[in-house]
Image (cartoon, rainbow, N blue to C red):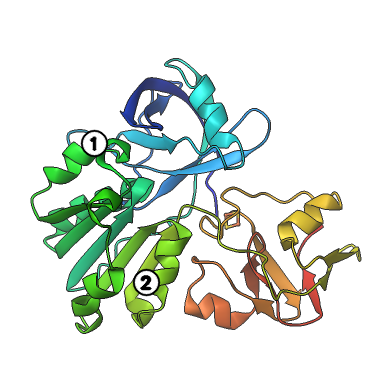
Amino acid sequence: MSAPPIDVVVASVRTAAVDVLEVVLEAADGSPLPAVEAGGHLDLHLEDGRVRSYSVCPPADDPGAWRIAVLRQEQGRGGSVHLHATLRPGCHLVVGLARNGLPRPQQAERLVLVAGGIGITAVLPLARAAQAAGQAWSLVYVGSRRERMAFLDEVQSLPGDVRIVTSRDGGIDLTRELATAVGQPGTHVVVCGPSRMIDEVSGLGLGDRLHVERFTPADGAGPGDTPFEVRTRSGLSITVGARETILEAVERCGVRVLSSCRAGDCGTCETGVLEGVPDHRDELLDDDERASGKTMLICVSRSLTPLLALDLP
Ligand code: FES
């Protein structure tokens, strides 16, 4: 769950690649910021109440810095466009630390790290953490073209097996790329990238050796989904339509729920299940949490039963 929000100020802003802003934050009161584990991210609370999640990607020479990269997404939900237009040094922001959705699998003998586009912001700290821990690793950074790939210089200067692949150079066949990893029981694969990349690697049979974070929302509702009922503690009964998420449905009915990524990645919307069986579609809950049936992420997950009673007001 999210830690209490912190007041921060923008220390610097610069262009890290086409449509990507590098933003460094510091505490508004000058105090040291809490350490963020590799793979961790923070939630920026915008003035209009929206919250956007960004991986913390410190530079090599300042591992405690809260540096994020904001990709401008015209087709997104507006948060990144707003940030590109308004973020300037000296701006004040409220930031929360969220649950780490992509911790380094320390048990792995070897890590194969795959970053798609802005996903490098989660993967780069993992490569550095693996290097520091003496864990074997390799990294593939995939992008459309080099001008759009943030932190390329830093990736290229990593002391390890690093490959940069662009669509212009022919792209990448992940099935072939990861074939060796699939056959090595001690190798874990970590992928952060767009949904289509996650979907591709999810079919390779890596099981619990696959660790993913997508930076575009998981499909909370889609073809084949059907409506179901959600009941809150106060007895409010809400129909969740086939093309909306539980979160959208309860918000439509005036139920206030904390949320952030709305993609099943951060855990902010985690909600207790009192009755019914959830259809888990997130990337965050572990097998035990899923099997318990007692909790779910309502921004993406749905229901396997006609009724879900949830621990909502
Ligand atoms: S809002 Fe992030 S997991 Fe639901």
Q: Which residue is mark 2?
A: 201
Q: Position of residue 293 (x, y in %)?
A: 64, 79
Residue 253 visible, this angle: yes
Is 141 located above or below residue 104 in the figure?
A: above
Is 160 located above or below residue 179 in the figure?
A: above
Q: Is residue 222 left or right of residue 21?
A: right
Q: Position of residue 18 (x, y in %)?
A: 35, 32
Q: Which mark is residue 272?
A: none
Mark 1–mark 2 Cα distance, whole angstroms, equals 28 Å
Q: Which mark is residue 59?
A: 1
| Label 2 CA crowd tier, 10 Å (few <14, some 14–19, many 20+) | some
Query: Helix, strand or loop at disc 1?
Result: loop
Which quadrant does ligand 1 occupy? bottom right
Query: Helix, strand or loop at disc 2?
Result: helix
Residue type at numbered disc 1: Pro
Q: Quadrant of the C terminus?
A: bottom right
Is label 2's Cβ within 8 Å of ligand 1?
no
Is 43 located above or below residue 276 in the figure?
A: above
Which dot, 1 or 2, sits closer to the camera? 2
Residue 57 occupies which quadrant of the picture?
Answer: top left
Q: Which residue is the extreme one toward the top?
A: 90
Q: Earlier in the sequence, mark 1 or mark 2?
A: 1
Residue 179 occupies which quadrant of the picture?
Answer: bottom left
Q: Position of residue 281 (x, y in %)?
A: 58, 70
Q: Quadrant of the N terminus?
A: bottom right
Question: Are circles 1 and 2 on residues that touch, CB within 8 Å?
Answer: no
Residue 232 visible, this angle: no
Residue closer to the observer: 264 or 146: 146
Q: Position of residue 2 (x, y in %)?
A: 54, 49
Residue type at numbered disc 2: Val
Which residue is at 8% across, 50% downward? Answer: 159
Which residue is at 25% across, 38% downward? Answer: 151
